[in-house]
Amino acid sequence: MEIKETSLINLHKSHGAKLVEFAGYNMPIQYSEGILNEHKFTRSNCGVFDVSHMGQLFIYGGDDLTKDLEKIFPIDLQSLKINQSKYSFLMNDNGGIYDDLIITKINNSYLIILNAACKNNDFKIIKEKLKDKYQLELKENLSLIALQGPGAKNVLEKVIPEIDKLKFMHGGEFKFNDMNIYITRSGYTGEDGFEVSIPNEIAENFTKVLLDKGSKLIGLGARDTLRLEAGLCLYGNDIDIKTTPIEANLKWAISKKRIDDNYPGSEIIKKQITLGVKKLRVGIKPESKVIARANTKIFNKENEEIGKVTSGTFGPSVDHPISMGYVDNNYSLIDTKIFLEIRGKKVSANICKLPFYQKNYVKEI
Amino acid sequence: MSEVKFSKEHEWIKLEGDVATIGITKHATEMLGDIVFAELPEKGSNVEKDGTAGVVESTKAASDVYTPVSGEIVDTNQMIVDDPAKINEDPEGTAWFFKLKMKDTSEMDSLMNKDEYDKFAKESGS
């Protein structure tokens, strides 16, 4: 299969990007400054991320569509206001996660941001479930540019002054070069920030303007360390078709109002909410500086295997190794001592609260 | 003058008497990216040529460090364990990994000199 490129490919190359294939796209893992500097710059200033590989699915329809989408997603879409976003899941009948996503209600349509590796399958599933009643478009002509960090607002405001009114998890339509762009105040780094859906033909120019205002390009490597410090799941690592949102400790994303309704996986979700789960996603901090990466086995004091790490790295802002993983629910309490098997040795670690790094979201203005 | 030699696993080795100082090359650090963890062999342990003798981890991945020659570990560099970023800063100088007492200094003969290594690194790209 041919490797795809985003509309920022030339900009990546001119900034010294190390390109790797990710979900079928040639994407920057890092630029010339490296992951640690990129990470820290995002936490202190404003990082710009090309996330154009992610799917931008538009579904057009009115009140009927809202009702039909509620049969697919476990969230209260009827109460969702126009231009408001919510985190949700596409699940199978066992509550297994096909994808995690962000749904935004727009005038007479919904915009759903999907993971790159999942987007084509998601499209197929959603289209089938909606039985061809609505027009669905997985837009290839739009790029997605994220600005993240405490300086994100200042940078974007210099280009689009009206964005200062956006609240977290809300969006709106704006103009750049006389073309419509859609901006939401959201992101996946634990920082305040914005995601800009913009036509491919002006995406590079727009990004160059952002860079001129003092932001820097940040690669997927730092995106991973940032999201892990923020305790956010990476699809394919921390959540997948074999985990449910309840096991993933993402119960907050299931609307309370919808718990008794029918949607794919609803029976299992309800059961797990009522009776509890066998395994649970937790934060893990090794006591030493050793890093426990994905697939590291987790043991209890009695040397019984109790789980597995699903993501692990060095957290540059926490200045310590950090991991997430699933453990037997009997061991999920904070400060529970566990052991990680790393290169044949058992290394002591503790269950710790998520996020590892305190978020800086702007909730109210 | 002692000559610095290089291995295909991107280690450098400098022999003084029968004691070899070993570290990873600048090229290796550029490939690895920011190094955030280093683990070294224990003093007094014996390591075999081409066997593992430590680990470095970048933000991206873990990589084994191999020893290009056999011998007994006589010293390790605690500085790079305490501050792994030093490996990126000065890989072929102060950020050496370990020193070992060689059993057979002829093991040096099969290793590359600087020109050969530079060419190898450029061609292999890894």
Image (spheres, coloured by chain):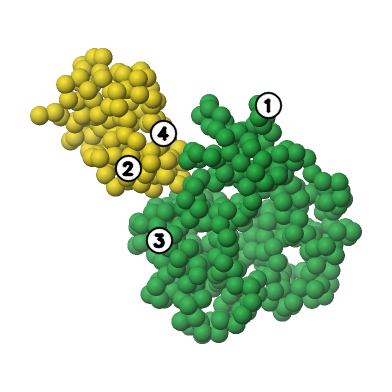
Q: Quadrant of residue A142?
A: bottom right
Position of residue B9 measured from the top left corner of the image (x, y, whole percent)? 33, 31
Q: Which mark is residue A302?
A: 1
Tell me which amino acid carries mark 4: Glu
Say what secondary structure mark 3 lies in: helix
Task: Reply above or below: A149 against B97.
Answer: below
Query: Which chain is tinted yellow?
Result: B
Chain name for mark 2? B
Can you see residue B4? Answer: yes
- The first of marks 1 and 3 along the sequence is 3
Using the image, name the chain to which the residue with label 1 belongs.
A
Horizontal arrangement in the rendering, residue B51 relative to residue A232 (left or right): left
Mark 4: give few (<14), some (14-19) or many (20+) Cα within 10 Å. many
Looking at the picture, which amino acid does disc 1 mark? Glu
Q: Residue at x 58, y 63 (%)?
A: A359
x, y (%) of residue A56? 62, 65
Q: Mark 1 or mark 3: which is in front?
A: 1
Q: Which mark is residue B87?
A: 2
Q: Residue at x 57, y 67 (%)?
A: A360
Residue closest to the far top: B103
Q: Is residue A332 above or below residue A213?
A: above
Secondary structure at badge 2 equals: helix
The reply to whether label 1 and label 3 mark residues of one chain is yes
Q: In the depicted view, which residue is nearer to us: A76 or A330?
A: A330
* Chain A, chosen colour in render: green
User: Residue A12: which numbered mark, if any?
Assistant: 3
Dot 2 or dot 4, earlier in sequence? 4
Disc 3 chain ID: A
